[in-house]
Amino acid sequence: MQGLWTTDRIRKAEERLLAKTPEGALMQRAAFGVAVQAVDMLEAHTGRVAASRVALLVGAGNNGGDALWAGKFLRRHGVAVTAVLLNPEKAHAAGLAALRRAGGRTVTLDAAPAVLEAADLVIDGIVGLQARGPLRENAAGLLDHISAPVLAVDLPSGVDPDHGTVGGPAITAARTVTFGARKPVHVLNPERCGEVVLIDIGLGPELGEPDLQQLDAVDVGAAWPVPGPRDDKYSQGVTGVAAGSATYPGAAVLATGSAVLATSGMVRYAGPAADVVRSRWPEVVATGSVTDAGRVQAWVVGPGIGTGNEGRRVLEHVLAAGVPVCADADATTLIAQQPNVLDARDPGTPLVLTPHAGEFERLTGAPPGEDRVAAVKAAARRFDAVVLLKGNTTLIAAPDGRVLANVARGSWLATAGSGDVLSGLVGALLASGLDPWLAAGAAAYVHSLAADLAARGVPVSASGVLAAIPDAVRHVRRLGVV
């Protein structure tokens, strides 16, 4: 897993590292990494490096210093470098001197528009990790003059480093170079950060345990259940699905199909859409009621069951079964409207809740707000459940405080029925015996990957995402075999 640390913890770790490092060494190491990425972007954007033009947006503090030193390294490649000094009196003195010695130019704000309009690449070194709030007026006025790709130093200026929120004018970067460790902004606002490149500056044990974690393909592939020589359909997990209705059978078809395609175990469907499910998925054992479903190792409940008395009875039966439960859609609404429905749950039985932002507000009484990480952690503690808060960046929190972030590959999942597909994936992984937090995170990863594979650059339906699940699992399994 890849770790992410809050800016306060990064700052403290850097202070401990700086205390045992020669003065200026860390900044030059970081700046060299920025210069390497700048060269790569120039080659991709213009086809050349020498004689290309780079504009540095230089604020006060160390990020401005990183940009200035990077400009000095770029001069060695024959790049014409011009630094726009937003606050000349507070520019990093050593970096400024190094750039000037290397033949770089400096200008003030009045000359900045022409410099930015002529640039092949802009390096954003306006503010650092300690800054909060949008860009100030003098910097914000420059945004309209930027047409070249932007390479951000640590984070795009104007974006909150811990929450990823934007409250006004801010930089949008094509690529962000960060140092030592990744920060929450890099997953909470990926559209502003662009591609994130991590430069090793020697931070190690100083960091401690991460505040957030992100699964990669290797993690998911290694965790995904596949049959062994002694497995049978029961040993791999039997998933129960209580979803859909006679009028709206689509949720049942999607959630059940997702569970079928996720693992090699067995799927039981229970509900009024049994005939439709059976015709689409003949391998499913389908019955009309949860009371007739038989034994399962996990339940998926909620998509399309309704929020009336019948839906409540289905939810209570499932919660009382003593097996892990993924509660989605109408089940989430029922819990929000009638919290005592959770009394049917045996204490300690794993529960995964999968709300989108609106459902989260109904569940907790408040929207996720700017600090989505704190909000989802609090909800996980409150419900003693794994809470999967859907979004372009999906957050998965366990009651013990662990948090996973999954960054979507585009916005292809913004389509009706995609949540039903996700709930089926979560349920199948719960039935296989995976830790509920990991199951939810791995399901979110494969769900996003399946959408990307199915879309291939154009909008895709939930049925298309469903069909791409085997390809997504093949992808992570190929990378995850150890």
Image: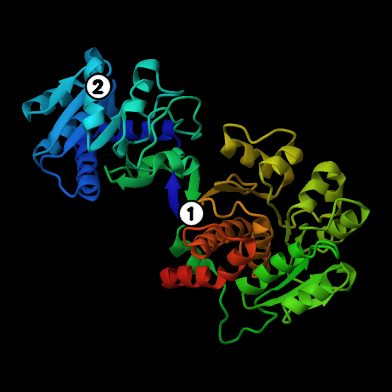
Badge 2: how crowded within 10 Å, few (<14), some, or many (20+)?
many
Total label count? 2
Identify the residue position indicated by label 2 in the image: 112
Residue 117, given in percent of the width and then of the height, sits at 25, 30
CA gap, disc 1 to disc 2? 35 Å
Q: Residue at x 44, y 48 (%)?
A: 3
Q: Is residue 304 visible?
A: yes
Q: Of the residues tagged 1 and 2, which is closer to the observer?
A: 2
**Side (left or right) of 375 relative to 309:** left
* Viewer-nearest residue: 120 or 138: 120
Q: Give the quadrant of the N terminus.
A: bottom left
Check the image and name the residue furthest to the bottom.
229
Residue 432, given in percent of the width and then of the height, sits at 64, 70
Residue 453, given in percent of the width and then of the height, sits at 49, 64
> Which quadrant of the figure has residue 112?
top left
In the structure shown, which secondary structural element does the residue marked by tag 1 occupy?
Answer: loop
Q: Tag 2: residue type?
A: Ala
Q: Is residue 295 visible?
A: no
Badge 1: how crowded within 10 Å, few (<14), some, or many (20+)?
some
Q: Tag 1: residue type?
A: Arg
Identify the residue position indicated by label 1 in the image: 409
Q: Residue at x 81, y 61 (%)?
A: 248
